[in-house]
Amino acid sequence: MWTKILDKAPKEGTMASFEVEGKKLFATLNNGELYCADNRCPHEDIELTLGCLKNNRIVCSLHGFSFDLATGHSSDEDVDCLKTYPIKQENNEIYIQL
């Protein structure tokens, strides 16, 4: 089931945080593509939206680990992957699938 999260896509290179069904998530538009993932670093309990986007990755502000926006793969094999979610745009509105 698809859930509406935003009335429009975030601006290119920015992140929008929100909560759905008790999950803290973020959405971003990076290089023209929409992405959605947990807004919590799998290494430490810190919001990833406090970090930055670099290339096609989100970089955690605490220890500098980064995660691929498309796959969630970590830059360090000892750090768990980031949970990502399917996301789409319909009539300018943004939806995710949990």
Image (cartoon, helix red, strand yellow):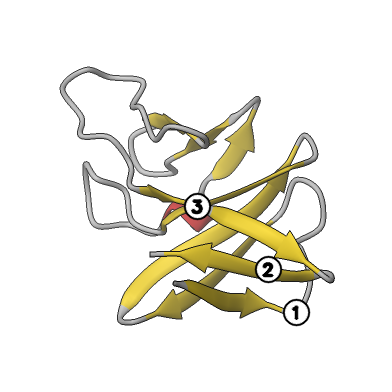
**Position in image of residue 96 (x %, y %):** 53, 64
Q: Secondary structure at mark 1?
A: loop
Tag 1: amino acid: Asp
Tag 1–tag 2 contact (CB < 8 Å) = yes
**Position in image of residue 20 (x %, y %):** 41, 79
Which residue is painted at 80% across and 40% down in the image?
32
Give the alpha-carbon distance from disc 1 to disc 3, as whole Å: 17 Å
Does residue 44 sit above or below 71 in this rendering? below
Give the residue pinned by disc 2. Answer: 94
Q: Is residue 25 left or right of residue 23?
A: right
Q: Is residue 61 left or right of residue 31?
A: left
Q: What number of labels is visible?
A: 3
Which residue is painted at 33% across and 35% down in the image?
63
Q: Quadrant of the N terminus?
A: bottom left
Tag 2: amino acid: Ile
Tag 1–tag 3 contact (CB < 8 Å) = no
Give the residue pinned by disc 1. Answer: 7
Q: Earlier in the sequence, mark 1 or mark 2?
A: 1
Give the residue pinned by disc 3. Answer: 86
Q: Earlier in the sequence, mark 1 or mark 3?
A: 1
Q: Residues within 10 Å of mark 2 (few under 14, many from 20)?
A: many
Q: Secondary structure at mark 2?
A: strand
Camera-nearest residue between 78 and 19: 19
